[in-house]
Image: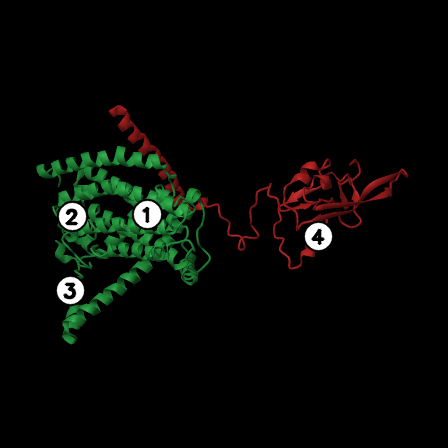
Chain colours: A green, B red
Amino acid sequence: MILSIYNFTSLTDKFHGFLSAHLSDGIVLATELIVTGLLVITFVAVLAMVLIYLERKVAAYMQLRLGPNRVGIYGTGQVVADVLKLVLKEGITPDGADKLMFNLAPYVVLSTCMMALAPIAFGNGLVLWDLNIGVLYITSITSLGVIGILIAGWSSNNKYSMLGAMRSGAQIVSYELSAGLCIISIVVLSGSMQISDIVNSQADGWWIFKGHIPVIIAFVIFIIAATAELNRAPFDLAEAESELTAGFHTEYSGMKFAMFFLAEYINMFVLCAMAATLFLGGWMPFHIGHWTAFNNVMDYIPSPLWFFGKTFFIIFIIMWFRWTFPRLRVDQLLDLEWKYLLPISMVNLLAIALMNILGWHF
Amino acid sequence: MTLGNYFGNIYKGLKSLAAGMRLTGLYFVRRGDSLTQEYPENRESLKLAERFRGEVVMPHNESNEHRCTGCTACELACPNGSIKILTKFVVNEEGKKKKAIDTFVYHLDTCTMCNLCIVACPTDAIIMANNFEHSVFDRTKLLKVLNKPESKIMTGVE
C-alpha cells in the first residue's frame, strides 16, 4: 500500500552514490553535512518569511483589515523588506548587560529550535535523521530553548526582560507535562518513538480517526499546550506587550532580535509538524481502512504536500487562537495547566492505554 | 468544587472559546466586511465619518453671506490661539454703526481640531469640514482667512 508513494530515499541514495564514486568517505560525509546544513538554513529562512506573511494576513483578515498589500504582489515583498531592514540594523548591546551571555542567547535559542527539525519527516523518506527516539528527541530539544530565553532575560539587566524570562520558564516547564503526556498517548498506540514508525502506523487511517474520543481530547490538549510552549497569545505572558514591553527580548535589536523572531516561528512549525505527525499522519495520505482503490487515488498526491498541508492547517488554527483570545493572567495560566489539562491528560492516557490493550481502536 | 462544577466549567469555557473563534472565523471568510479604505486609489469614493474634524471652515451662501457676528467667542474658546478675529464698524441701512468682522484669521498649522470653537459659536457660523489633505511646502499657506472677500453677515443673524 505504501509502496506506491514516491520514496525520497532513492533520491538521497543516488546523490550519496554519485559523491562516493568521486570522493573519499570523509569528504563525502563533510559535503553531505554542508549540503544538508545549507538546505536547512534556506528552508528555515523561507519558512519564517512565509509564516510571518501568513500571520500578518490572517491577523488582518480576522480584524477586518487588509494587511500588507503595498510592496510586491499582495504585499509579499513586505516580508523581504522587513528582513532586509532587520539585517541592516545595528545590534545594540546595552552597557549594563552581561555582554557574553547577551550575545550568546539568540544563538542558543535559534540553534536548539533548528536542531529540533532533524527527525521531522517532511515526506516519504525525506528526513534528516530518523533516530529511534525521534519523539523524545524533539520534546527534549524544544525544552532546551527555555535556557536561551532565561539567559536572554537575565543578561539584559532589565526588569522587563527578567520578568518575561521567568514567566516564560514557569509556563514552558508546566505545559511541557501535558504536552508530553499527549505525545506518550500516541507512542502507546503506535508502539514506537521513531517518527517513521509512527507515520507508518497510520497507513490505514490517521490516529485522530482511529483513536476515538480519547485521541481527539489528546489532540486538543496538545494544541493548547503547544500554544503555551510557543509563548503565543493567549499565553503570551512572557512578552506581554502591554505589561512588559516585549518581555525577554526587550533589549534586543537588529539581527539578534530577528533571531528570536525566527526561533519563535521555527518552533511553531516544529510543534505543529509534531501535532500533524502524531495525530494527522504526517506525510501519510488520507487513507480509509482497506479501501484500496480510494487509498491509491490519495497516494497520487505527493507526500510532502500532505505533510505541509496538515502542518499549515494546524499553524492556521494556532494563529486563529492568537487573534481571537485575550491574554490569560498568571494564576489562570497555572490553573488551566495544573487543574484542568494535566489531570485530564493523565486520565486520558490511562483510557488510551486501556483502549490499546483491549484493541478497541481500528 | 464538585465534579459537576468541574466539568461544567470545562464545558462553559470551551463553549465561549468556540463562540469567539466562530466570530473571527466568519470575519476571516467574509472578506467584504473589511473596514480598510485603500486611500490614494479611492480618493474619489473615500468615505469619512460626518463628525470627522479636518479643518475649520465658514460656510457662505450664494449671495456671499456668512453667519459670523464677530463676537470672538471662538477666539476666546481656542486653547492655543489659533483664531484671531479683526473687527470693523460698518454702517447698515438704518444708518446705524454696527460691529462686523473684517478678517477671520485661522492658523491651521497650530489648530488641534479640538472642536471648542465650533461648540462656542452662538450663531453656528463655523463648522468642521471633512477635508484632511493639508500638506503644503510652505507653512505660511496654512494661515487662512475664513471669510471670503466682500462677504457680509446674513440678514437676521444677531
* SS class, disc 4: strand
Residue type marked 1: Phe
> Is disc 3 on the same chain as disc 1?
yes
Subunit that carries the residue with mark 3? A
Circles 2 and 1 in contact, beta carbons < 8 Å: no
Per the rendering, the mark at residue A202 is: 2
Subunit that carries the residue with mark 1? A
Q: How far is mark 4 from mark 2, CA to CA?
A: 75 Å
Q: How far is mark 2 from mark 3, CA to CA?
A: 22 Å
* SS class, disc 2: loop
Residue type marked 2: Gln
In the rendered image, the residue lying farthest to the left is A358
* Near-viewer residue (B64 or A21): A21
* Near-viewer residue (A261 or A124): A261
* SS class, disc 1: helix
* SS class, disc 3: helix
Q: Quarter of the image for the C terminus of chain B: give it.
A: top right
Q: What percent of the width, then of the height, locates residue A16?
A: 16, 68
Q: What percent of the width, then of the height, locates residue A162?
A: 37, 46
Determine which residue is flagged by label 1: A316
Per the rendering, the mark at residue A232 is: none
Subunit that carries the residue with mark 4? B
Determine which residue is flagged by label 4: B143
